[in-house]
Each structure stands twice: as C-alpha cells, then as structure tokens.
Amino acid sequence: MLKVWNNEKFRVIVFYTILTIILTWPTAIHFFSSVPSSGSDTMQVIGVAGDKANLLSDRGFFKGTFELIKRSEFNITALYAYFQLFFGRIAGYNLLFFASFVLSGFGAYLLAFFFTKSKPASLIAGIIFAFSPFHFHNALSTNVGTMHQEWLPFFALYLFRFFENLSLKNFSIAGLFLLLIGFTEHQLLAFTVIFILFFLVYKLFVQPKAYLRPKFWIYAGVSLFVLSVLFFFMFRSLFAIAGSKNNFLDPGFKAAVKYSNDSLSILIPPNSHSLWPGAFLKIRNQFERQSDSNFSVYAGYLVLFLSLLAVLGIRWLKRAHISTKGVFFWLVVAVGFYALSLGPYLHYKGILNPPVKMPYFLVYQYLPFYKNIRTVGRLFVWSMLGFSVLAAWGSIFLQNILQKKVQSLKLSPEADQPLADKNKNTDWRKYAKANILYLFIGLVVILEFLAIPLKTDSLLHSSFYEKLGQDKEKYSVLEVPGSTSYDFASRDLVWKSIHRKNTINSYDFARVNKESNQFQRGTPIIRTLLYDIPEGTSGNDSDIAKSSYYDISNEILNYYNIRWIILDKEGLKGKPEKGDSNMLYPAKAYITSVIKCADEYEDDYLYACKVGQSGIPEHMFLAMDYSNRHWVGKSKAKNGIQRWAENGAGVKLVNMASQTKTGQLKLNLKVSKPLRITVALNGKEIYNKYIASVGQKQVISADMADIRPGENDIVFGVFASDGQEIRSEKKSDTAVVYQLEVE
C-alpha cells in the first residue's frame, strides 16, 4: 500500500477524488439513493442506458454488445448500461459522474505538466478544467457527451508526445483516446477535428520537418483509414440520416445562431454559484437569452488574469529558463474556440444588430456535417482546456515574480540562486511559501466556481411500473402527458426501462423528426389522449374527420394492442405558477366516460386504466396523414376544422376487420374557382368531377370497394380547368375540405 501511495500519479488522482467529493456535495452522501441532476436530460441518459441494460441482460453480455454495435448504438450510454448492470441504476450513474471530474482533473494535470514541468501549477490547471461552471452545467443538465470531457486532455497530450519522436506507442495511445472521444459523442469528435486542424497548422510553423518524414505520412494514412472505417461504422446511422431527404438532424441556421454563446458570457458568473447567485442578476436579465447554458461558459476572473500573465510574461519566463513552448498554441486554442463558440454571428447581450459574421460562419458553410450541430456553444469545451493550461503558466509566472521580490527584500543568499534551478525541483513541500501562493490560487478558483450543494434526484416513481415489468405478456401502454411534456417524456424513458413495455407516446427532444409521431397525431382517441387533453382541449380528435369515435374507442385501442392508459399526476398538473390548468381531472373524466376500463389502479404518482377487451375488431375509421405535405393550410370553421388541399392531399382509412370491406366516403368541399376534383383509394380512382360552382358547399360522396384490412390511402386530386395539377399554398387556388366521414 505504501508503494502505491508513493506513486505520484496515484496521489494526484486521490487529490482530485477528494476534491470531487467535496465540490459535488451532497452527491457522495446520497451515492446509492440519488443522482446529481438539475434537469430532465439526466433522465434521458439513465432511461436510454436502462433500455440497453435490459438488452444486455436478456441477450447476454457479448450478444447484447454485438447487437448494440450492429444497431450503431454502441456509445457512451452503452457504458452507462454496463455500469447499471454491475452497480445498479443510481450507483452506476454516480460512478461515471464522479469519474468525469476526477479524470478531467487528472488529464489536465498531465497535459499542463507536460508543458510547464511544475506540479503545483499543473494541479491548478486540473482544478480549472475539472470544476469549471461549463463542466458542472453539462454534468447536471445533462449533456452526457460534453459532460465526459475527460478524454480531451489525454488526447492532446499524446498527440504532442507523438510529434516528439513519431513513436508507435504514442501514436496508438493518441488514436485510442480519439476513439474514446468518438465513442463519447459525435459532436465532441467534431469539435476535436477542428482542434486537430489547429494543431497541424501550428506544427507546420514550429516543426515543419516532421511533415517531411515518410514515417509521419504512413502514420497519417493508417490513422485516417482506420479511424474513418471505425467512425463510419459507429455513426453510419447518423450518416444515413444526414444524407437523406428527411435529415431531421439538421436544426437549421437559426439554431446555430440561437444556441451559440454571447460575447459577454465568459465574464458573467452563472446563477448556480453558491455564494453570490444574485450578484450579477441585473446584467443577466439584460440578456435576450437567459438560459443557464448561456452563462455556463464563465471562465473565472482569476483564470483569465493568469492566462493573460502567461502571455504577457512569456519573455520573462524565457529569461528565467522556464519552458514556454506551446503558450501561443494554447492561446490560439483558448481564444479560437471561444470565438467559434460565439456561433455564426456576434451576440452582445443577445443582440445581433448589426449582424457581424464570426469564424463559425465559415465552418457552418464549408465543413461537411457541421450544419447538423445544434449546440454550437459547446465548442467552448476546448477553449476551457486552453485557459486551464495557460493559467498554469500564469501561476508559475506569478509565483516566481513574488518569490523574487520576497528574496530581494530579504537579501538572502538564496536570492542569487537562478529561478530556473528552483523551478526544476518539483517537490513543492520544500517550498512552503510558494505552495501557499498555489494554495491561495486554487482556493480562489474554487470559490469563483463553487456550485454546491448540487441538486439531486431520487428517481421516485410508482410501484405500478415494477408490476407491469413482472407481466411478461407483450403489449403497449399509453402514458399522458408523454407527448407534450419534456420533463415527463424524459422521465418516462426511465419508467419504460422498468416496465419494459412498448410506449405509444412519442416526444422529440433535441431534433424534431416530423415523421416520428404521425401515428400518434393522426389516430382518433390516441390523438385526444396524447395531445388534445394535455394541451387543454377536451374536444374529440379535432380535425376534418366528422365522425365521433366514442363508440369504438376500446376497439381502436385493442387494435393497436394498447393495454393500459396511464395518467401521470405530476405531469398533468403543469406549472400552476405559469397559469397552467391541472388537466388530470379532465383527462380522468374523459377516460371514465369514453373508455371501458377492465381494471383501475391509482396511487400518489399516477392513475391507470386497463383497457377492456371489445371483441374482434370490425369497424373502420379515418386518420389524418400527417406525412402528407399537400395539406397547405388549416383553420377553425363553424362546424369544426377546415383544411386547404392541393393536388396529392390525403388521409388514411383504417380497416380494423380481418377481411376486405366496402363503404362510402362523404365530405364537404368548397372551391374559389372552377376545379376538377378526383378521389383515389389505394391508387384506384373512385371519384372524378369538374366543380364549377364557386364559393358554395359541395357534398361529395364516393363508393369504395376492396377496402383492404389495415391502412388504406385516400388521395385527393386537385386540377385546374386546363388539366394542370394545383400545387399552391394560396387558398384561392386550392380546395377547402371539411366534415370528412366514412360509412
């Protein structure tokens, strides 16, 4: 044990472990009962990891892992899944949470020591990088990719070491850490690619001969090939989406502007500070976007001061024979990534007038796939590492300047000793006065960043979910307000990993996939439960379909194998402080009046209705086709909803029976100019008429034969008098459709 304790690196790890326990209080106290969290995103991580843990448990460690790799889902949440299996849902999460701080500090320490050769100064660098407000925010929010920033300093360290002698060992270790960055998050990898570009340009100036060595190009070619194959394999699903017509990963240019940092945010402490959360409240209120993420990039005044000293004191450091190799590189990284994190346009208190273009505008326009990055402000993670290393140099400069002054005042013989010789001795126990300065710097940095006590979440939930989990029968559950509440939808991922049933409710978190919830929005009864009631509308399936589906509600739910409807009490009460109505009672009243419940369950967390079986399905119903882009307008009318249809607008007709049926389609229609209207069922025309009566309601009916079981497509044709199809968003060009029904 003594031998281990004498290991310098082990003691450094212990140092950051103790700091982590102190500075993340009370996480350690609730290590087995709560997770650190300030938002719903933590639940998403735990929920997704829980789902993967179930897969690993069911299929076995190796088969489950292979399945995750095959699905392109082998990433950081898979690591959380392994930890859940071995240590439990809460303790497993907390271990990785702690590791992100300890390893961030240790990695930054090693990186800073590589350049400065000063252990106390390197400890300061580790404190800054590990416990910065930026890291705390992303660890608590939780953005799991940026939270696990710990691999960045290790990668940078071995990249520099590799260029020293082009050794295979350093090349392999650097590649491993780059792979870990990619494993953590594709967005973090994209940021690292820009860092590599910075590095290669820097080396072109300071070490150009390295590019003339064939060995370098062999390594470069091998790494480019191997990593390209690995990353393509890891992110192939993302590449497929990015190259498709429905690239929902692209949030648009406005998102890149919105989620970038403000130019002043680096100077404004966040409201999470323990000692003076309201000290900068007045200036924070002046910002247009007052989100926590916007102020998480606070770098600390002492950190910025020390970074400035590192740059201004570089000549003095050189004269004192203190290594300054890399100062300007890390200055470029710190300032460069800060500039990139400001996004395409310069923000000043959220104001973009006039719109001044920033460097990221070029990145957005010309680097492939970077348009898919939504949270541009997280580029600051590399900037924070740059400031950490610079602050280590600044600490050395300040310590040596003060030490020189003290020695000159005392006129001691020791004053004649060269500062470089003093700096060579890295055992800070022999220099108590210098250590007091470093201790003071560390304490001030901690006070500037202090965010304790952290918020924790105990993941309390209804025992009903465990009850469902014990039921091995396969069916679906419908949870309200799982489609309209970000908070509940996030927590529902955790509950889903417990009850292990398919959930009908759907919610898009960061990226909106317009095709993901078309079934939920278009299907009667399901739409009312998931959207209308939580949003405060008690009407039944408010769209152009005229029929009421009260009589066949159980039949529809049975058809889609929905066994339980669950109302979350906390989620449905909304936010009373914002004037939200408690929708639990309308939702419960709707269920008891429309749905026949075979059984009920209720506790402090939820109300659940077991959907009664209605026999063999035999009816038909109309469902809106929200994937159809040819409904070009919608508004309220006296008798419900009316929609404007261009050529190609359509709906779904669902035949729940197991045999082919016949029926009749009826609808009201109005045109502003003469149009030819056609109706097709599954591609076969069933109606064709030229309507010349302008501004008058037309009652259209069409006989339908061969209505096959399942979904059938009803498509409207809208043509001008000359036969040209109508493709226009102008109301005067299109046909108005309302009161659509099938008999």
Image (cartoon, grey):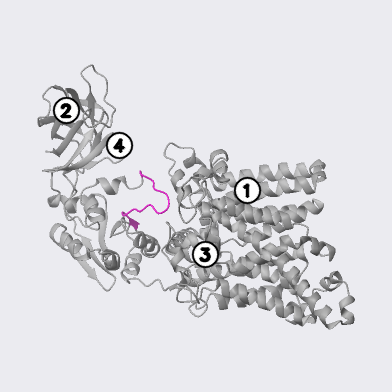
- Mark 3 packing: few (<14 Cα in 10 Å), some, or many (20+)? many
Which quarter of the rendered picture does the N terminus lie within?
A: bottom right
| Amino acid type indicated by mark 4 | Asn
**Residues in magenta, as a range:** 502-515
Majority secondary structure in the magenta region: loop
Could you say whether the residue bearing mark 1 is in a helix, strand or loop? helix
Question: Within the image, what quadrant is residue 6 found in?
Answer: bottom right
410 with respect to 571 (left or right): right
- Magenta segment includes 513: yes
Q: Which residue is mark 1?
A: 193
N-term mark: 2 or 4 = 4
| Amino acid type indicated by mark 1 | Val
Q: Which residue is mark 4?
A: 628
N-term mark: 2 or 1 = 1
Q: Separation of disc 2 and disc 3 at Cα?
A: 58 Å
Q: Which residue is mark 3?
A: 268
Q: Separation of disc 2 and disc 4 at Cα?
A: 23 Å
Q: Position of residue 97 (x, y in %)?
A: 54, 68
Could you say whether the residue bearing mark 4 is in a helix, strand or loop? loop
